[in-house]
Amino acid sequence: MEFVRTFQDIFAHLFHPRRSNNHRARLIHPESIFLLVLVAGGFVALLHLFIGLSGPSKKILGFASSITPKEVIAATNDQRSKMGLPPLALNQALTEAAIAKGQDMFSDQYWAHTAPDGTEPWVFMRQAGYSYRVAGENLARDFSETPAMMTAWMASPTHRANIVNPQYSEIGIAVIDGVLEGYETTLVVQMFGAPEGRQAAVPEVPTVRTVQATEPVNTTTGLDQPVAEKSGVEDLAALETNGDDEPEATAGGEETAATDEELVASISNVLTQGVLASMLVPIGEIETPPLFTPLQLTKAFFLAVIMLIILTLIYDTFVIGNRQSTRLVGRNLAHIILFLTVAFLVVFFKGGIVG
Amino acid sequence: MLREFSKHKLSYSILVVVLLLGVLAFLAAWPDRASQRLISVAIAMFYILWGIIFHVNIKQISRKVVLEYLGVGILAGVLLVLVTL
């Protein structure tokens, strides 16, 4: 009974304006507010400590956020260097295209290279202002670590072909958190390209060529790329590059004199083989989705703190309003407006890191 | 609360408009988290300044009031910065 009375007293002291708290809920005194700053900082520190200690195999938190664009680029270039290929340079326009693609998948709730409305990955590249000679896209989701994701990509022939494609010189990466098909996940969008008007320095890598020549062409992505949209000069450049350096890549057709029609067909073929859209990595094969992400937990905790403060401020306003007493304190209405703004930003803050 | 708002229309309008601009800037800055953190700090600093200027204008300033706005502003800024980590 004594315990209940003590608890009631503490509760009233914290939330109810009375003499013991100088007629202002203790929770909204400056000292308590500063204490809440420490509590919020401590929560985030503990959360990150827990993530670090528990390791990536646990299924409680969303460890997918440990993937960073920097790591993905490094791992990609590592694979290329093993094949004797030059590293890919990070391109801002390709990165913007990758971000746009990731956002589009979250907003339209799909998981595919082609959007439900038929939008191809290349549309995002063009919208980002990236003019390409050849381009490709890899996707991944639900991975906790970059090495595991890279291993899965390299195990898939079409993904591997993109990563070690000697024609590509640039890359764009997006690592985006969001809710897809009912739970929060991390999407990784990898976009490759070789800019128009620049000859790719294709080194002699026979194994890569074999992969390209024998790889079944994804006709959807390749043939839907309208040849008419590209200028003749750039198409010829693509054809010449392949004709000189990779005769087997264009050897699928008959060997006849190059009429205009055949030239267009050859160009289409070359572009098709350059645009290697990849297979999707099945979710189940990779990892069970985590229960929570660190971002979700942080948001939930912060919103709880904010709501507690807002409710206390509202209660304090009404109690003091009824008493018709005057206090020399900050304005509750202003505090409420500020904390509502913060709550809005916390709710609508989008995770994901790009670089 | 409505009485309080109508009593200081100009001050609260400035507060609401600047916070709305802050929200728009914060959302537009995505995915640049560094910019979002800067905007968070700017929002917090603006609020502290707004509070002090408001209380100076109505001649109800005290050390405790300044501390209160400092605390509330810092808490808001810290929450926004931490969520972007």
Image (cartoon, coloured by chain):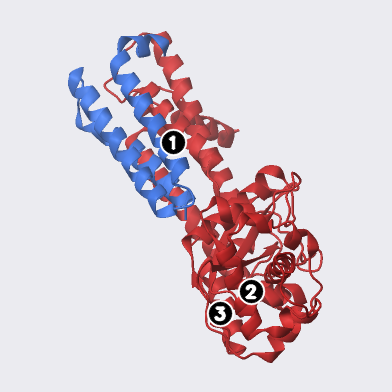
Chain colours: A red, B blue
Q: Position of residue A210 (x, y in %)?
A: 75, 86
The vertical placement of A17 against B30, above or below, is above
Mark 3 and mark 1: span between their CA atoms? 37 Å
For image coordinates 63% across by 62% down, the residue present is A188
Which residue is at 47% across, 41% downward? B27
Task: Give percent across and percent down for residue B81.
Answer: 42, 49
Q: Position of residue A29 (x, y in %)?
A: 35, 33
Q: Quadrant of residue A263?
A: bottom right
For the N terminus of chain B, the image quarter is top left
In the rendered structure, which amino acid carries the disc numbered 1? Answer: Leu
Q: Position of residue A142 (x, y in %)?
A: 70, 62
If you read the primary sequence from the N terminus, does the residue marked by circle 3 or circle 2 appear first?
3
- Of badges 3 and 2, the one in the foreground is 2
- Which residue lies at the image location 20% right of the left edge and 25% below the top edge? B61
Which disc is residue A77 wearing? 3
* A142 displayed left or right of B30: right
Can residue A50 be seen from the camera position used here?
A: no
Judge depth for marks 3 and 1 and give the one in front.
3
- Seen in the image, is A105 located left or right of residue A99? right
Eyeballing the image, is A118 above or below B10?
below
- Tags 3 and 2 both on a single chain: yes
Residue at point 44%, 53% (across, down):
B33
Q: Quick check: B11 left or right of A124?
A: left
Residue B24 disc label: 1
The nearer-to-camera label among 2 and 1 is: 2
Q: Which mark is residue A239?
A: 2
| Marks 3, 1 in one chain | no
Asked which quadrant contains residue A274, the reply is bottom right
How far apart are the two marked residues, 2 and 1, measured between alpha carbons? 47 Å
Hey, what amino acid is under mark 2? Leu
On what subunit does the disc labeled 1 rest? B
